[in-house]
Amino acid sequence: MSTTTDLSELALTAAHDLEDASAEEILTWAHDEFGSRLVLTSSMTDTVLIDLAAKVAPGIDVVFLDTGYHFVETIGTRDAVQSVYDVNVINVTPELTVAEQDAQYGEDLFARDPDRCCGMRKVAPLGRALEPYAAWASGLRRADGPTRAGTPVVSWDARRRLVRVAPLARWSDEQVADYIETNALMVNPLLDDGYTSIGCAPCTLPATSDDPRSGRWAGLAKTECGILQ
Ligand code: SF4
């Protein structure tokens, strides 16, 4: 089994070697290196990464963080993905149901302390879900906004001690749209209603500016849920 030092050095080398590689090449590298210890996470906004991964690594595990606050359209997209693609969707839930959280912390914690709410409903469940894996691929893109502009195609997550892979890091919005159209991919129906980044319903509005993530926690200083830290 690879040591932490081996994996961190592997990530550093791959970040350099794969900077100009295609998404398929990056996914193929990750699949060859990690096999079943590679996992994907998806917000079920679109299915680009799932479509690519299902071709490169059929049966791959796809973690979905089911916070209990998702739009019905997002849950429908998750269910359709499981039916259509050769992937294994793993529905990850928080320790507390929304009702239990309301009872312990008061209703609508997201409005009073969104960092704490995200911590319990996203960050902690993701940490538990990623424990069996050595590498974690996600759909992060540099074009997602200023907070993601420096996303490497491969990096080392020292906190979780796993390799992070971002096969779409260099993709523009136009590339994503072209891939969806060319391959007739399903997308979350909310994309047609002006939602350019889709998270939990109480904390997501249609985009309010050119920043695609401007509808997330609109009006608050918060811009990320914390799973990227
Ligand atoms: S996005 Fe909002 S509702 Fe979802 S976990 Fe974070 S604070 Fe809670």
Image (spheres, rainbow, N blue to C red):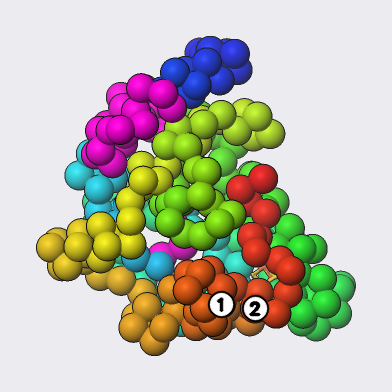
Q: Which residue is mark 2?
A: 218
Classified by dominant secondary structure, the portion drawn in magenta counts as helix
- Residue 107, horizontal then vertical, whole percent: 80, 83
Mark 1 beta carbon near ligand 1 (under 8 Å): no
Locate ligand 1 by image quadrant. Answer: bottom right
- Look at the numbered discs 1 and 2 and tell me whether their residues touch, using CB distance below 8 Å: yes
Residue sitting at x 41%, y 83%? 194
| The one of 146 and 193 positioned closer to us in this rendering | 146
- Residue at 73%, 58% (x, y): give it: 119
Q: Is residue 168 left or right of residue 136?
A: left
Residue 105 location (% of width, % of height):
86, 73
Residue 111 in sight from this viewpoint: yes
Q: Which residues are magenta?
A: 15-44
Q: Which residue is mark 1?
A: 215
Amino acid at circle 1? Gly
> Does the magenta segment cover residue 24?
yes
Percent position (x, y) of residue 92?
55, 57
* Residue 66 left/right relative to 188: right
- Mark 2 close to ligand 1, CB under 8 Å: no
- Answer whether residue 11 is magenta in the image: no
Label 2 is placed on what type of residue?
Ala
3D distance between C-alphas at marks 1 and 2: 5 Å
146 vs 44, nearest the viewer: 146
Q: Residue at x 20, y 59 (%)?
A: 179
**Residue 78, placed above or below residue 109:** above
Q: Secondary structure at mark 1?
A: loop
In percent of width and height, residue 168 lies at 35, 47
Residue 71 visible in the snapshot: no
